Image (cartoon, helix red, strand yellow):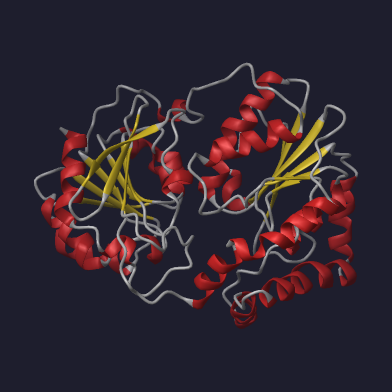
Amino acid sequence: MVRKKQKIPFKLELVRFKNSGFFNFADRIIFSLKPRKKIENKPRKILFIKNDRIGDAILTIPVIRDLKLNYPEFKVHVLISNKNSEYYANLDCVDKVITYDYKDLIGNIVIFDPPVEKNLSGRAFGKLYGIPLAGHLIQFIYAVLIPYIFKKSARTEISRLKAENYDAVIDLGGSKRLAIFCNMIARFSIGPKLFGMAWLYSYYLHSNWVSGIENDFMTRKIEYAVTDALNLKFSKRDKSLPYSGNAGNSQVEKRFDILFHIGSTELRKLQIETEAGLLESLKQYKVCVVDSSETMKYKYYKANYADKFTFNLFDSLNDIIPVAAASRLLLCYDGGQVHLLSQFVRTVAIFGPGSVDLWKPFEFEDYALERTFISGMKVIKSKGAFGHKAVYLPVWCSPCFDIGCESKLCLNSIDVESLKKVIIECIN
């Protein structure tokens, strides 16, 4: 593992300290006073809450599908954001999809999430939410307590969900406000190990959904929580990729050697000099560069490589599926694009501040270490049909789960030549 002295944010220091053994005694006391319990009777109606990222929403689908396959009499509802609802549309395993808009704080379930509007109020509260420890309390007061007391529409939404009479609600987000929300609408709730607050759930895991101690897929972690808490067993399994039929003809002509999706948060991407150097080294190949908007990098690459590569912008990941199916390889960063598009094309996913163990491309098979470069960069390869690969540099402070730092050692120490070798091996 690469170990190098570099300054990391105080927030990361605090998170690491909070997750250390120093505070474990507090959790042990809480867990002894309020031990987790499993459901007594077999549930008949279940609500999944998955309201954050696209990738996590997609990784939940195999679990819900196997749940319905083994227990077709169950009613399964999903509470999900508008931006993710298209990925749950027309799924046979879901009986009802409840959507909401992050930008609508009045009369909608979004009262349990922080505002994301691009205005002064949203930015101000966003900064307050980032205050260690106190930020969670401020967020709870603003996003839960005040709306519940002063907004009739908020209480109406809670009453409407409570009237569904769910036997169990599964919080796949993992926050104090959602834990409280779960208790408002159902008697039995499932969630992660929230620091000092796991007792809010009926059943809780021994870690948060996102933690640095994981060594397996997020999909499997979700399945374990669901089956263990609800006393269920998946004797039947569907190992087909959920969206594999959306590409049309599987024998479609390969128009591109590489589909390079350059979109993601800046924390998860290579610096522009490294990324540009990688593109420069791939000039002899048919490359399609895609993004969701005309970012600075996208404009720069298009201005300099318009005569060598194809460039496209897409509003939705679903719109990229035909291009992915027509490519021999997908190159992208850790994010939702990995989990959707890797169902149609072999993928090389670049990881930095995220957990490669949790979010490597999922195709129902394990991974094995394929190679370690002199630089320390590791390559793991799926044993599945596509043979997806994930590349990462195991530095001492990673994964930091998007807290980030100035040096970004986990990404900036990846060299172009090593990455290029991985890419070329996948296309040849």
- Regarding residue 87, the answer to whether it shows in the image is no
The part of the image, by quadrant, that contains residue 30 is bottom right
Most distant residue in the left direction: 284
Q: Is residue 74 left or right of residue 194?
A: right
Residue 178, percent from left and from top = 74, 56
Residue located 86% across and 68% down the image: 151
- Pick the front one: 161 or 210: 210
Residue 361, percent from left and from top = 41, 39
The image quadrant where one finds the N terminus is bottom left
Residue located 68% across and 50% down the image: 192
Residue located 35% across and 59% down the image: 395
- Regarding residue 310, the answer to whether it shows in the image is yes
Residue 394, percent from left and from top = 34, 54
State the count of labels. 0
Q: Is residue 426 left or right of residue 65?
A: left
The image quadrant where one finds the C terminus is top left
Residue 265, percent from left and from top = 42, 62
- Pick the front one: 59 or 42: 42
- Pick the front one: 425 or 301: 425
Q: Is residue 372 left or right of residue 16?
A: left
Residue located 50% across and 70% down the image: 12
The part of the image, by quadrant, that contains residue 322 is top left
Residue 402 in the image: above or below residue 243 = below
Residue 22 in the image: above or below residue 383 = below
